[in-house]
Each structure stands twice: as C-alpha cells, then as structure tokens.
Image: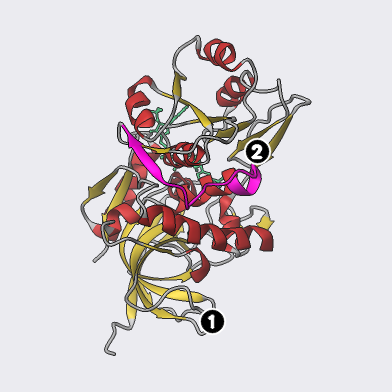
C-alpha cells in the first residue's frame, strides 16, 4: 500500500516552545498499533509539560486521540486495521520521547484502545480516554466498586439511572465535578449505584447535574465546608479530588471520617487528609498504559505496574460496552481551527484557566 513515509509531530524543544517536525512513520511493536490520527483533545497535563520548570525535551506532546487503526503488531488481536478507535498515550515522557498524541500517525498500546461507536465522532471520541480511564481506575481499581455493563438503564431528565437500585447506596464525593475527569467520575459513580455529591462552581451546577450528580456544592461559597459537613455528617466513604489543592483537601476532609474511607488525589506532592479513619491515596493513571515514565526532565521514574496495566486492558473492554450502549457520555467539546499547529494557543488558554466545562479538540486530517 502506498503510504506517506513521514508524519508531522508537535515536539517540545525548549521550555514553552513546541515546533512541528517531520519524522519517519514509526513501526508498531508486537503489542502496539499504528493509528492514523483524526482528532486530538487537550489535557491540563499537556500544558503543564510544555510550561513546566524542568521540561522533558525533546518530547512529542499530547495524550488523547482518536483515529483509524492503520497496522497492528504481531500479537495484537483486540483491534484490526481500518477500525475506528480512541486511545491514550503519555506525551512529554522523556523515557519515551516519541510517544505523544499530537501527531498525524502515532504508536499506541493496543490493550487500552477503545472501539468507537459509529455514532461517536472522532472529535467526541478524543475527549474520552484519559478522563474515563482515570475515573475507572479510581472507582474500580482503588475503591473496589463496579460499574455494571449488563443492567438496563433508564433515562431520567437525560441522566442515566440504573433501574434496579437494590444495592446499598454509598456516598461518593467528587471535588472538581465540572472537570473532565470529574464528569466521568460522576457518571461512573451513578452507574455503580452510588449517591454522588459534587463540588463545582455555581455556573457548572446544571452541567454536573446533567451528568448525574445528586447534590452539588459551590466551592466559591464561603459556607461550602459547613454545608458539606451538615449534609454528609462525615459519612462520605470515597472522595476523588480532581483539584487536589489546600482548599479542596480542607473541604473534602469535612465530609469524611465518620466511617473508614479513601481520599484519592491527583498530584504527587498534593495535600493529604489526616484522619485516622481516612486513607489518602495519590494516583497517576498513566500506569494503566504499562509503560515506564517520568515527569519533567529529572522527575522520578515510575516503573511498570503489571496489575494497573492489566486493569487498564479489562476496563477498556468495559468502556467500549458503556459507550456502545450509550451509558457513558463523552464530554462537551469545542473544535478549534488549525490542526496540530493550532494546539499551542489552545494550551495557553488552558494554562490561563479559560477553558471550563469542555475539552478543546483539534481535527488532524
Ligand atoms: N493524576 C492523574 O492520574 C490525573 C489524571 C487526569 C487528570 N489529572 C489532573 O486532574 C486535574 C483535572 O483534570 P481535567 O482534565 O479533569 O480538568 P479540566 O477538564 O481541564 O477541568 C476544568 C474544570 O475544572 C474546574 N475547576 C477549576 N478550578 C477549580 C477549583 N479550584 N475547584 C473546583 N473546580 C475547579 C472548572 O469548573 P468549575 O466551573 O466548577 O469552576 C473547570 O471547568 C488536572 O490538574 C489534571 O492534570 C490527573
């Protein structure tokens, strides 16, 4: 088959600088897939890599993508050439400097690729992988809850609701409920039969409720901590803190502690909840990829954790079913012009905190 021998990639070359490069199209390893990228979505991680103090250079940036499978490695059976998929890689990883998603062709690990339903566009599909794998990792791998795939779902006011509610309801608190990860967490919490409380801005109340949250609290309200404490009486057993700063940890801590519980935060040096009943866990969901990685140029090296990678593969199969059956909604997105060359201005907007309640996506054709 006649195929372009080169691909454009967006590579970070210096602090705050990323340039378009032309490189040979890579060849997939035995458990990998070559994907022709049709759309990418921006994550906060991408701007943190580009503008980090000790950047990992030179590395290709980007994590979330969707496109067509081009070729597969010799051990790959999950996907076939020409199938529509979305997936996740880790850009900005100095240990694997060519891995980023901001490219025309990329190599991706096969086990975490998601078949996209025909009704899901590449742009919508690209919004799913990192937030969905992160939320699933928290809910199933760390909390031990389960998102069922075989139960009928009814729709109430546009929200998915499991018909059979016989299981015991436990409370899940999602701090940063309007973030992409938060919205996936809210949806999965509801699918798992939990009562879901979310903390977000007042402007995002309707959005977060539309993804299933039962009760919402405004983090800009001076009475937020107290309201949360009054409502929960400290009985929240699971908290996912998508913001993970001093304020979020302080607010979350007021909702926990009356029962044994788990507080999950997203930053390696973020705050913990100090309570004898509460276990604080810090996660990096890139471990589902099954690849070694590092943050920045001199960050610690994270080894492969087989258990996490195995979870990633199993959860990918579940995600595909949830997407196929319409039980899990993609995130809202705004398509920006310019393809790969438009991405850096988008990352600047993310860094400035101007992107709220949606993903920025770019067509790569
Ligand atoms: N460790 C990991 O494995 C992992 C995985 C995924 C993401 N992350 C990290 O998790 C964070 C969220 O990522 P994301 O992609 O989900 O974010 P995102 O979609 O970019 O989140 C944007 C939303 O965050 C909300 N927000 C901003 N500041 C807030 C605050 N102080 N309190 C509460 N909500 C606030 C805003 O909603 P409002 O309208 O409510 O203000 C905004 O709509 C990022 O720091 C990301 O790097 C870590």
Of the pair 112 and 169, the residue shown nearer to us: 169
What span is colored magenta in the figure?
140-156
Respond yes or no on whether mark 1 lies under 8 Å from ligand 1: no
How far apart marks 2 and 1 lie (CA) works out to: 38 Å
Name the outermost residue toward the bottom: 1
Q: Is residue 206 magenta?
A: no
For residue 259, say whether it is visible: yes
Name the outermost residue toward the left: 337
* Image x and y of residue 215, in percent: 45, 22
* Residue located beneath label 2 in the image: 269
Q: Residues within 10 Å of mark 2 (few under 14, many from 20)?
A: few
Residue, x 38% and y 35% (percent of image)?
211
Residue, x 67% and y 60% (percent of image)?
307
**Residue 361 bears which disc, if any?**
none
* Residue located beneath label 1 in the image: 75
Q: Earlier in the sequence, mark 2 or mark 1?
A: 1
Label 2 element class: loop
Q: Quadrant of residue 351?
A: top left
Of the pair 82 and 171, the residue shown nearer to us: 171
Quarter of the image for the C terminus: give it. Answer: bottom left
Respond yes or no on whether mark 2 lies under 8 Å from ligand 1: no
Label 1 element class: loop
Name the outermost residue toward the right: 276
Q: Image height check: is 218 above or below 296?
A: above
Is the image coloured rainbow, by chain, by secondary structure, or in one colour? secondary structure
Q: Is residue 1 left or right of residue 264?
A: left
Residue, x 63% and y 54% (percent of image)?
298
């Amino acid at each position: 088959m006649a195929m372009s021998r080169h691909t454009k990639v967006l590579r970070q070359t210096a602090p705050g600088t990323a340039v378009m490069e032309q490189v040979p199209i890579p060849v997939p390893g035995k458990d990998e897939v070559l994907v022709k990228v049709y759309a990418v979505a921006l994550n906060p991680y991408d701007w943190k890599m580009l503008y980090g103090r000790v950047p990992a250079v030179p590395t290709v940036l980007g994590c979330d993508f969707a496109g067509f499978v081009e070729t597969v490695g010799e051990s790959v059976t999950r996907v076939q050439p020409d199938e529509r998929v979305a997936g996740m890689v880790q850009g900005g990883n100095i240990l694997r400097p060519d891995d980023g998603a901001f490219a025309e062709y990329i190599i991706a690990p096969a086990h975490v690729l998601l078949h996209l339903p025909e009704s899901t566009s590449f742009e919508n599909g690209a919004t799913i992988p990192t937030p969905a794998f992160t939320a699933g990792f928290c809910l199933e791998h760390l909390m031990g809850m389960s998102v069922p795939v075989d139960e009928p779902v009814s729709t109430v006011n546009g929200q998915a609701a499991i018909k059979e509610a016989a299981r015991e309801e436990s409370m899940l608190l999602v701090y940063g409920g309007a973030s992409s990860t938060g919205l996936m967490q809210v949806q999965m919490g509801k699918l798992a039969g939990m009562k879901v409380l979310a903390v977000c801005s007042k402007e995002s109340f309707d959005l977060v409720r539309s993804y299933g949250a039962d009760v919402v609290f405004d983090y800009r309200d001076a009475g937020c901590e107290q309201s949360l404490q009054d409502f929960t009486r400290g009985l929240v057993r699971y908290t996912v803190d998508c913001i993970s700063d001093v304020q979020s940890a302080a607010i979350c801590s007021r909702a926990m502690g009356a029962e044994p519980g788990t507080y999950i935060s997203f930053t390696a040096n973020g705050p913990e909840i100090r309570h004898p009943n509460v276990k604080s866990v810090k996660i990096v969901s890139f471990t589902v990829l099954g690849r070694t990685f590092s943050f920045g140029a001199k960050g610690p090296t994270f080894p492969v954790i087989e258990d996490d990678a195995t979870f990633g593969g199993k959860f990918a199969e579940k995600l595909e079913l949830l997407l196929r059956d319409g039980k899990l909604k993609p995130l809202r997105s705004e398509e920006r012009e310019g393809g790969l060359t438009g991405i850096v201005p988008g990352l600047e907007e993310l860094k400035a905190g101007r992107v709220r309640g949606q993903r920025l996506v770019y067509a790569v054709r």
